[in-house]
Image (tube, rainbow, N blue to C red):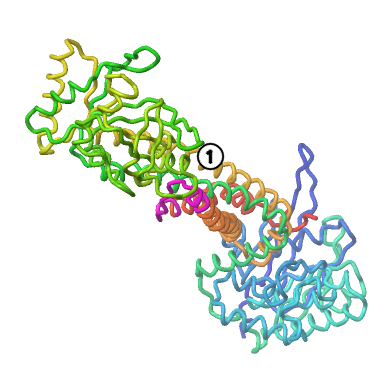
Amino acid sequence: MAAPERTAPLIELEDITKTFRQGDLAIEVLHSVTLAIEEGEFVAIMGASGSGKSTLMNLIGCMDRPSSGHYRLMGRDVATLGTDALAELRRNVFGFVFQRYNLLGNASAQENVEVPALYAGLAAGPRRSRARSLLTRLGLEERLDHNPGRLSGGQQQRVSIARALMNGGRVILADEPTGALDSKSGQEVMALLHELHREGHTIILITHDAHLAGEAKRQIHICDGRIVHDSGPSTPGTVAASFNASAAPHRSVALLDAAASVRTALRALRTSPVRTFLTLLGVMIGVGSVVAMLALGNGARQEVLDQIQAMGANLLAVKPGAPGVRGAGGMVTTLVAADAQAIARLPGVGYVVPQTANPVTVRAGGITYTTTLSATTPDFTAANAWPVARGGFFTAAQLQGFAPVAVLGQTTAKTLFPDGGDPVGRHVLINNTPLRVVGVLSAKGADQQGNDRDDVVLTPLTTAQARITGQSHLRLITVQVQDTGQMEAVQTAIEGLLRGRHRTVDFQVKSMTALLQQQAQTQQTLTLMLGAVALISLLVGGIGVMNIMLVSVAERTREIGVRMAVGAKPFHIQLQFLVEALVVCILGGLIGSAGGAAAAGFASLAGAAVQFTATPVLLAISSALMTGLVFGYLPARRAAGLDPVVALSTE
């Protein structure tokens, strides 16, 4: 009768060597190790410190690769597998039990046990149910929400064993599992390993304790990187019926990984609140600056546009002096009242409003005040969209009759009559000329240069020229065009008229809309400059995020090694740290947006023009998001590129 065909061992090593290099120095730690371990064995690999037993365990557990030789797992050459495939083996085949437990300090016992299944893509419900079941089985049902710092050494090791079993734990690699425990806790851990062996798990125990190794069915002694004794394979038993290589059907769901990474990020932020605040501060300042600056800039621009709409699109402004020409004392004197009268006779022209401006001293009662005297005509209020709040404006009859009357701006009225009484009907004295107040203008506010437009006194043009200033030159002539379709034709006619009257081009004619649009364009440019400065501050905040994340990677290197040991792929590690950077920037962005809106709100209460829109907030949040992606990528990539063995051995 033919003998049954022999199946391949579960683990088979052939002429395995492992060499570590330190500069030009090569140190061979394992020398031609040949070993086969069958399914269901309980093997103890025993040796003194430095004998190479931990290196051999790392090779068996796919944490490291041999320098030469062949390692076949379940008949498949491990050398042909990529990084992700090795991570899947660590996750689905092996379960690690470490001497120092290697639990995540800021996660609960249940969350620690869930980690391997999380990386396997197991849905939250089944994952949590299995974790609770395993911890309950190991006597930790009352410690599910306890962090490792609140657990004894024996309890932490039981959590470590539950984690090893989370995805099935076909092969349990126990590295000095009782080394940090008292004798009673050590006996309990060994009893658990025996129980798992009886259930069909393959147990590989790494120890230097001969008494402990004696509990295994097979003892392998290693010395100076060579196997010096092997008691031989125990009788290969079949896998127990109760053994299940997979706890539950796994599926890869990236969103589950992202959600868990967000929770991990929030826990990491809570661990160091001062550093978290400083990290958030840079992003908060940057985002808040973007929101506040753009709100203020948009408000100023909208104010200019409102002026355009209020003044109408059918106005022309005639100003004295060609570009670059200035008169004595800085005042250009090329326009006179006769020019305004001539313009008024042109076809297509509606009203024409000449205007002067002179500094004067005004007295009322015992109060003396220096303000601006603006001499004009009754159409001034229509040309400037500036209604009268109290009383009325002077009339055409008063203009023709050189009437000694005045209309006050709000600032001038409040200064000269602080008692709050109605100035209408009372008298003021300008350059020793008494004028009766006939009206008070409504409040107008500051212009684009910050000048107070309410700080003014208006009189009829004839009155000012004959009784007060004695000057005939004008500062501005505002011309209304009856048909906006004839704007260009009327402008050309005015230019021709004045060129003929003055025999030179010593004036400027511009559309009022064009002037205000030019101001709006200038304001928009300033807004963009302010936004650019704010974005630079956000960039600086992003650099701070990257710096903190690099420090975080260095501080959490061992945690990264633990995650890799339980099956995290480089993608998982990179995703985790990238999500952490995004969480920092998004939190900073949200807080910064609220702060920027509050700052703009205070500016609005102080009188500044503010306009809130969704665009600046979305821009700021998007910038914060991009900051997290850009500046979080390098730390995330560095974390994902760590060697599992080196990371796990980091103190």
Query: What are the residue bounds of the magenta stretch?
Result: 600-617
Q: In this view, does 482 lie to the left or right of 407?
A: left
Question: Callout 1, which amino acid?
Answer: Ile
Depth order, front residue of 353/35:
353
The answer to whether 285 is drawn above or below residue 583 in the figure is above
Secondary structure under tag 1 reads: helix
- Could you tell me how many numbered marks the image carries? 1
Residue ID at (77%, 86%) = 139
Residue ID at (67%, 74%) = 111
Q: Name the residue under label 1.
A: 536
Depth order, front residue of 426/239:
426
Q: In which quarter of the image is residue 540?
A: top right
Residue 386 horizontal/vertical position (percent): 30, 43
Residue ID at (61%, 62%) = 86
The answer to whether 245 is drawn above or below residue 430 in the figure is below
Q: In which quarter of the image is residue 110?
A: bottom right
Tell me, yes or no, if residue 210 can be seen here: yes
Q: Is residue 606 inside the magenta stretch?
A: yes
Q: Is residue 409 left or right of residue 90?
A: left
Residue 340 horizontal/vertical position (percent): 18, 25
Q: In this view, does 435 lie to the left or right of 504?
A: right
The quadrant of the rendering that contains the C terminus is: bottom right
Q: In this view, does 120 lie to the left or right of 323?
A: right
Residue 458 horizontal/vertical position (percent): 33, 34
Residue ID at (28%, 45%) = 392
The answer to whether 325 is drawn above or below residue 386 in the figure is above
Q: How crowded is mark 1: few (under 14 residues within 10 Å), some or many (20 or more)?
A: some
The quadrant of the rendering that contains the N terminus is: bottom right
